[in-house]
Image: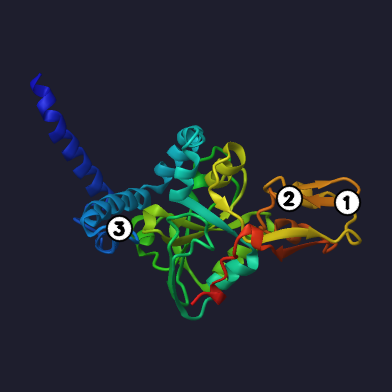
Amino acid sequence: MAWLLLLPVALALGLLALWLVGERGHLMLPSTRAAFRGRGGAPGERDSDRPKRRFRDALHAYVYGRWPYQYIDFCVNALLPVMAAPGAKRWWADRYHGKVLPTELARRIITLDREIKRTDLERVIPYPTARDIVLKGPPAVTLLECPCRHARENPCGPTDVCMIVGDGSFTLEHHPQRSRSVTQAEALAVLEAEHRRGHVHTAYFKDAMDNRFYAICNCCRCCCGGLEAMIEHGVPMVASSGYVANVDEEACIACGDCEEACPFDAITVNARASVDWERCMGCGVCEGRCEMDAMTLTHDERKGLPLDVATLH
């Protein structure tokens, strides 16, 4: 039974080796040091709880950021059925979630020309861990190979469509073969191309990333773990943009393009297109697909407030 005593030592050595491999042989890369230094407490948290939370969140952030492909592969291929268990849906949504962005609002984030700091965004993102959006504009953008698409056997292309907004040094240092810095014009071109493909822009807020706005993902229904969790398993991981699609019945010719394109199954077409208010997330995919300009997005406060950085102070 003496070997049992060696298990903790072996585990510790294994974790150390994994960490060293993760840091590519260095004791600690600069971005790792900065990430661990920058961990903060949650609003309203007791001072005595902060060291524990800081270490837990720093470790989670490191694992998530260092091995996102393994992390997301496990989530989409093994964890989704568990996430849909009774009582678990809201817990997951509170810790990893996004808000749909129409293309125009996604553009505004990428083209921001001033510093912005806004906290307590719960009226914009209706989840208790969505706290801050902090950008020292104009924001730097890093493109990353999408972990969700990477986890699928036959993913949609292109795959380098995840946008880290702000400081992308951790991603660039740890995933130099799968990430790259891009100019504002290049980032806008990616947004436009993904919109034309019928993909959904989502602003993601991750508990693993210090409760802050972190990335703009360009999501397709067939690959995105967040959309799959919501549409297939009923886990409310994606919040509405605050807009709803409306049909101009005189302009609509019932071609069916919008119904085919809608990622949320919110449109049916008979004599005219009709929109299911509950299902519509205000992504604007139908608006971009309609050649007759019969679909428009309108703000609906019952769906929440849009994440419009131009109005944040």
228 or 230: which is nearer to us?
230
Question: Which badge, 2 or 3, is on the more N-terminal residue?
Answer: 3
Which residue sits at x=19%, y=55%? 27
Question: What's the amino acid at mark 1?
Answer: Arg
Which residue sits at x=52%, y=56%? 126
Residue 212 in view, yes or no: yes
Q: Which mark is residue 261?
A: 2
- Tell me: 103 left or right of 276: left
Which residue sits at x=54%, y=70%? 109
Residue beneath disc 3:
45
Question: What's the amino acid at mark 2?
Answer: Ala
Q: CA distance from mark 2 to mark 1?
A: 16 Å
Question: Which badge, 1 or 3, is on the more N-terminal residue?
Answer: 3
Q: Is residue 272 above or below residue 151?
A: below
Evaluate if marks 2 and 3 touch, with contact meaning CB atoms under 8 Å apart.
no
| Helix, strand or loop for disc 1 | loop
158 or 81: which is nearer to us?
81
Q: Which mark is residue 272?
A: 1
* Position of the N terminus by quadrant: top left
Instruction: Give the residue furthest to the top.
Output: 1
Which residue sits at x=51%, y=80%? 113
Residue 8 occupies which quadrant of the picture?
A: top left
